[in-house]
Image (cartoon, helix red, strand yellow):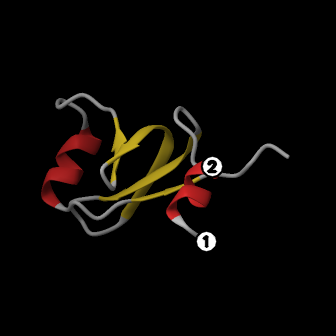
Amino acid sequence: MTKAEFMQYLTNGICGIFATVRQDGMPEARGWQFQYEEDGKYYFATANIKEVFAQLQANPKAAFTYMEPS
């Protein structure tokens, strides 16, 4: 699958599950909205006062998954 084909599925604003790594090494997942892709980077929005922001600063490894409604 090409990136262009993949991006047909991962449309701007689609909701899914975003997972990060907590300080104790355990995963934490929560409902999240994908914003957009630009220059090979995937963007998700949050505030810098939230725990998810601190988790990403400490460990930038994350995962996002979604399921089509159909």
Q: Residues within 10 Å of mark 1 (few under 14, many from 20)?
A: few
In the image shown, does 66 or 30 lie closer to the viewer? 66
Residue 27 vs 42, above or below: the answer is: below
Q: Quadrant of the N terminus?
A: bottom right
Direction right: furthest residue: 70
**Going by the image, does 68 lie left or right of 15?**
right
Q: Quadrant of residue 53?
A: top left
Disc on the earlier residue, 2 or 1? 1
* Residue at 55 percent of width and 52 percent of height: 7
Relative to residue 64, is residue 21 drawn left or right? left
- Residue 3 higher or lower than 35, as above or below: below
What type is the residue that disc 1 sits on? Met
Can you give x and y, in whole percent of width and height, for residue 68 in the image? 74, 48
Please name the residue that numbered disc 2 is placed on: 8
**Residue assigned mark 1:** 1
Residue 23 in the image: above or below residue 69:
below
Amino acid on which the number 2 mark rests in the picture: Gln
* Residue placed most toward the observer, 16 or 20: 16
Q: Is 66 positioned to the left or the right of 28 in the image?
A: right
Nearest the eye: 56 or 11: 11
Q: Which mark is residue 16?
A: none
* Residue at the spot 33% in from the left edge and 56% down from the top edge: 40
Q: Quadrant of residue 61?
A: bottom left
Q: Position of residue 28 (x, y in %)?
A: 40, 55
Q: Residue at x 27, y 69 (%)?
A: 25
User: Are the residues at dot 2 and dot 1 in contact (C-beta closer than 8 Å)?
Assistant: no
- How many numbered dots are placed on residues in this image? 2
Task: Tell me the residue at 55%/67% (across/down).
Answer: 2
Residue 19 point in image, percent of width and height: 42, 56
Disc 2 to disc 1, C-alpha distance: 11 Å
**Closer to the camera, 51 or 38?**
38
Query: In the image as oriented, which residue stretches furthest toward the left?
Result: 58
